[in-house]
Amino acid sequence: MTTVRTPETVTVLRDVRPWGGEPVDLHVADGRIAAVTPHDPAAGTVPEDGVVDGRGLLALPGLVNAHAHVDKSWWGRPWVSYGGEATTQGRIAHERAHRDELGIPGVDVTLTVLREFVRHGTTAIRTHVDVDLGLGLRGIEVVREALAALDGAVHAEIVAFPQDGVLRRPGVLDLLDAAAAAGAEHVGGLDPASIDRDPVGQLDGLFAIAERRGVGIDVHLHDGGDLGAFQVELMIDRTLRAGLQGKVNVAHGFAVGDVPASRQADLVAAMGEAGITMTTVAPIGAAPLPVHALRAAGVAVGLGTDGIRDLWSPYGTGDLLALTTQLARLSRFRYDEELVTAARVATSDAARFVGRDVHDLVVGAPADVVLVDAENVPDAVVRAPRRALVVAGGRVVARDGDVLV
């Protein structure tokens, strides 16, 4: 059985180097950063309640996992061998056939995944949760129960996700609407063309829910090339017509990385004008997204782990900083400023993906802080060193790999 200790409440996190800068003390009140003051080495180290010594370590904002599936994992169960056909439809069918026997979704396995996130410094997530005719909304209830067990260590927004399709499964649109009415922050979609074979119909249905319920839209789009680009263009058009700028996300969006340069430039510019965002899981083998061009056009980019040890893939550790290393390598980032960009994609720039106005080491931000033993941010991105301390909402939730919640 996992031993859980009471997290320590922080009033001052002393002697830390935000983003590799000069040493400062972070003062915390009501779970937020209340002040940032230069560190005075002469102040001494007499132990006081709530004063935590950062030992001069590099500080980053808590990592933000912008694309997770915490309801799907078999982590903590005996090893599950990969099976089924290696296609999107094959994976869907295999998951549907075997999830019940593994107790998926389940509070215990979801909690195991969330605690691994905490161990590795993730303090906020956007998680897709399966909503289908077999599960109804039970998966969302499971995820909420697991999050509640962590008592605020992980801030989360939920996407009601139709993994088995939308229009091809009559009744799923009603479930998505019910999920939105019950508090899910976003409704999801899945390959409107290749899965539902009706991109206009699926998107019309999703946008109708978003307009009616005031929620966001987050569509998994695996289709590449012209087919994928066409669907992005449909989303751009609907976003502008519905006035949903800033509330629509394209997850994966492989087409944006693999269409010809001229079309890519036009597509990225149009996405920026529509306020559409993108999330990636930095997959090996896919054409990398043009991160610099997207950011320059005003398209926010988020990074996520996708599924972890589930019926789709045995891979995944929950370490978003290590995935940041992968994003940097796949994007061919080498210069210091590029490596810092990768770190910001995984932290401060991802605030909007979890419903926050600010997520950084500044006054007014949530007191979510990760300390690592690194010379500077590029060093931290390249090595992904062990998280020495993780603070979430002003509480120490992990220390040297020991999760305290």
Image (cartoon, helix red, strand yellow):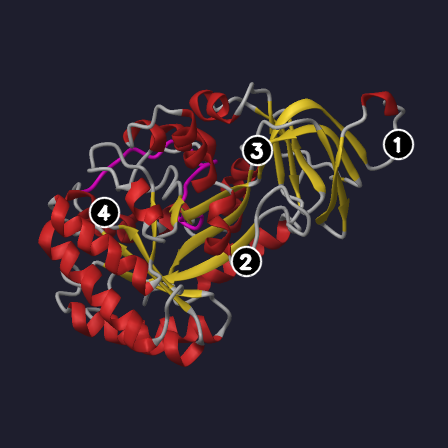
Q: Nearer the viewer, mark 4 or mark 1?
A: 1
Q: Is residue 6 magenta?
A: no
- Residue occupied by mark 4: 91
- At label 4, counting other C-alpha atoms closer than 10 Å, the crowd grade (few under 14, some 14-19, many 20 or more) is some
Q: Secondary structure at mark 2?
A: helix
> Is 391 placed left or right of 330 in the picture?
right
Checking the image for residue 344, the label placed there is none
- Return the residue nearer the eye: 347 or 151: 347
> Is 152 placed left or right of 49 in the picture?
left
State the extent of the magenta-drawn residues as a range: 68-84
Q: What residue is shown at x 47% (from left), y 61% (from top)?
A: 140
- Tag 1: amino acid: Glu
Checking the image for residue 144, the label placed there is 2
Q: Are marks 4 and 1 in contact (CB under 8 Å)?
A: no
- Return the residue nearer the eye: 280 or 37: 37
Q: What residue is shown at x 21% (from left), y 48% (from top)?
A: 256
Q: CA distance from mark 4 to mark 1?
A: 53 Å
Q: CA distance from mark 3 to mark 1?
A: 25 Å
Q: Secondary structure at mark 3?
A: helix
Q: Secondary structure at mark 4?
A: helix
Q: CA distance from mark 2 to mark 3?
A: 19 Å
Q: Secondary structure at mark 1?
A: loop
- Residue occupied by mark 3: 119
Q: Nearer the viewer, mark 2 or mark 1?
A: 1
